Amino acid sequence: MQSILALEDGRIFRGLGYGHPSECQGEVVFNTSLTGYQEIATDPSYAGQIVVLTNPQIGNYGTNQADNESARPYIEGLIVREFSPISSNWRSEQVTDEYMERYSVPVLAEIDTRALVRHLRTFGVMRGVISTDVSNPDALVQKARSIRKMDGTDLARVVSTRAAYPFDADDSRNQSGDSLLPVAPDQNEGVRNTLHVVAYDFGIKLNILRMLTREGCRVTVVPAETTADDVFALRPDGVFLSNGPGDPEPVDYAVRAIRKFLGRVPVFGICLGHQLTGLALGGKTYKLKFGHHGGNHPVRNNVTGKVEITAHNHNFAVDPDSINQSEVELTHVDLNDQTLEGLRHKTLPLFSVQYHPEAAPGPHDSHYLFHDFRRMMEEWKG
């Protein structure tokens, strides 16, 4: 079937529709990962967004339950160059077209994704509409212009769990009973479930929870709007601040909670959690022109001097000039555009990174951060 993408600036892209034959709308962003389309689709940080994948061949290894990063896809729509109608992989349980149709995700294929990505890089991310009603593109452009912008939008409370729950470590196993990611046989020997982490769900990914349990943590997941007092009542050894969608500034309830945690319990934040940490420390955030989305971003660790290849998914960032560097060390920087990618308080047990050390999809260079969090909790507890 024919399908169309209409951007708010009037640019039109025509192609073929797959997945669910319906209309969707959202902010159009691009992701440069070579694999991991299912993990990308099920990342709650993409709520409210249509994702363009730069890798030209998508869907060819199918989908399976083990690769979900949440219970369902959160992307509004998917745009690709070539969309495979078949799958060829021993792990595949369902072809990608059927998977997207099952979860009502429209897919637009057979368009020039290079031209679209270049357009977004030149003019910045913008609102768009995917529709199989191709007869009146001007009306779709007007509809795109009426979509609510991400700026000022709190989506964390939208995607968050409604009630606290303990994470079941068995969720970190695939169907064969093996860990989804490799772990050294003696890595967690003698430390299983010795530390209690309360993890805020601003749009948390399953692999974050898996990584925490592999570091010997018992994890309780709580809703985004949970107060600091309610967290303290759970007697945590550490607090984790998750990734999530939208603008960090309206998530003021989380900022207030984080300020109460400072100096009273170890804190580790990633992605949105990093931005909220920056705000809690008195900093400011801003929106990037086209964001960082992909599994191949070089980040320099200023402490070690090493360069890590990292997975990213964020449209907002912390302004480094707004951070009081007499109290806070800027630990990581993106080598593509010098965006602040990590910070650590000099005297309090708190650190955060903008990128995704749990990957899924992406490289494993930054897995050590979960070990650093465990060590920080042990030292604080001791």
Image: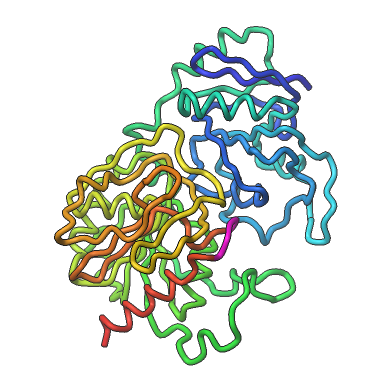
Q: Residue at x 34, y 57 (%)?
A: 342
Let me know if residue 85 is in the magenta part: no
Who is closer to the viewer here, 109 or 366? Answer: 366
Tell me if I can see residue 223 in this picture. Answer: no
Q: Position of residue 166 (x, y in %)?
A: 45, 70
The quadrant of the picture occupied by the C terminus is bottom left
Q: Position of residue 333 (x, y in %)?
A: 37, 53
Main secondary-structure element of the magenta-colored stretch:
loop
Residue projecting furthest to the bottom: 190
Q: Residue at x 39, y 53 (%)?
A: 354
Region of the chain picked out in magenta, as a range: 360-364
Residue projecting furthest to the front: 305
- Compared across the picture, whether 152 is left or right of 357 comes to left
Q: Position of residue 313 (x, y in %)?
A: 48, 47
Residue 207 image-quadrant placement:
bottom right
Relative to 31, residue 147 above or below: above
Residue 99 image-quadrant placement:
top right
Q: Residue at x 53, y 69 (%)?
A: 210
Q: Position of residue 14 (x, y in %)?
A: 70, 18
The quadrant of the picture occupied by the N terminus is top right
Relative to 124, residue 337 above or below: below
Q: Residue at x 45, y 51 (%)?
A: 203
- Compared across the picture, whether 201 is left or right of 266 comes to right
